[in-house]
Amino acid sequence: MKNNGFNLSMQRFSVSSLLIIFLLFASNGLVYSQTQEELSPKDKAEVFQKVWNLINDRYYDSNLNGVDWLGVKKRYEPQILKAKDDRKFYSTIKKMVAEMNDAHTRFLTPRESLEFKKLQGTTTGIVLEKIGEQSVIVAVVPNSSADRIGLKPGMVVKEINGKSIEKRFAKTQKEIGSSSSERVSEFLTYRKMLSGEPGTFITLEVVDKKGKEFKATLLQEVVTLKPRATPQILPSGIGYISVNSFKRPISARFRQALLQVKDTPGLIIDLRFNGGGDLNETLRMASFLLNERRSFGKVIRRSRNLRNFSRKISVGRRGNQIYSAPVIVLTNKFSASGSELFASGLQEVGRVKVVGRQTCGCLLGISKRHKLKGGGELHVSDTGFLSSQGKIYEKNGITPDKIVELKIEDLRSGFDRGIAEAENLLNQKMAKK
């Protein structure tokens, strides 16, 4: 299994550090609390050089994603030397790393690094998405500040802290630049607009489904990710499992969930808002749906001579399958990384149908978290992925077999059109038997 020092069977990749979509890329909006002595000018220069070198030497694509990385260094080095404090320094480092246009390659401040280790993040409790020209709440974190004051999916946000959300969106999007795809760029823009220190507040001007405007003050709170695979049997008799992450020990929990629905005639696996997790967990979970070894594509890395090389990955074995009936996987634009590998890998071998919306287009791997002086941390995408049919996941995402557009009226009424379409498709399959 070894090739140029790369051991696929033993090495665990952080296929995504999205943590769950509510914690996604907290590091792209500056979140910094001073808890130690400021870095000296020498320290800052050393951190800057190490960050630049790590990306230059370890990025999975020898072409560095088409970025003039040397030119980036020349532009940012003078700014680093002028950074008057750690806050400005970290802000500048973040902007430099964001030049890679890659949602996985990122810099974390000391506090973000600590939260990441604990699977924590700071959130107001809502996820915004642009539907038409409106900024719409599409998800609310249970028991969050937003949930407690009654914010609901389908409500429209008009202002943030007294400023027009449209103007703020355009300004923020320009500040953060592009990323892996337009879908994640939109999310990152909203994420930064809503970010803040734990314990602080943000005020929104919101319009409910009846057209009534009101102000909502949200508390920035620290939340912790708990990987869950939640099973149930729908009234139709079809099985359903919601999976919120591919972080360990999710494969064991997914296995138990499958056992609880193994006698159902069809199964829906919901990966909407699932940001990914661990490669081995992802492959192990996919194997529970297969009864033979199948190709899951290739991983791409750089060898010691800094050239790209690839290695095949496969999943499944005879006698390991837990569920054999038809399966539908639900996705949306927030389904990222491990979710994309799981859905596409099984889709391409004909084991599942995918229903929902185009996925994030954010599938790269991080094999090591690089600790930096002062407590910061750098994640570098050192692993890329190709599907079994040679498709590139990054930027493109996964195209569903059945596309289900998001509608405000569905959000407001609580109607889950994705589940409804998945049930219809499964019923059609079962009727043909």
Image (cartoon, rainbow, N blue to C red):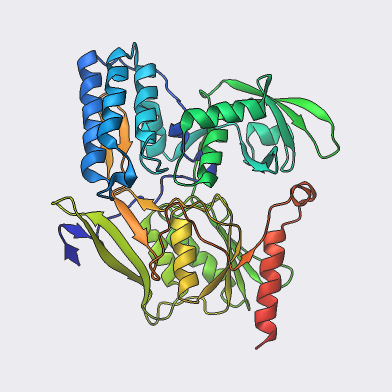
Indicate whether 284 appears above or below 198.
Answer: below
Residue 172 drawn at (x, y percent): 54, 28
Indicate whether 412 appears above or below 289.
Answer: above
- Residue furthest to the top in view is 84
Is residue 221 at all visible to an observer of this figure? Answer: no
Residue 303 drawn at (x, y percent): 17, 54
Would you identify the image quadrant in which residue 307 lies?
bottom left
Q: Quadrant of the C terminus?
A: bottom right
Q: Which residue is drawn at 57% across and 20% down?
A: 200
Is residue 356 at all visible to an observer of this figure? Answer: yes
**Relative side of 61 to 171, left or right:** left
Q: Which residue is drawn at 34% across and 19% down?
A: 89
Q: In which quarter of the image is the N terminus?
A: bottom left
Indicate whether 136 appears above or below 272.
Answer: above
Indicate whether 113 appears above or below 264.
Answer: above
Residue 44 drawn at (x, y percent): 25, 20
Pick the front one: 414 or 3: 3
Residue 132 drawn at (x, y percent): 70, 43
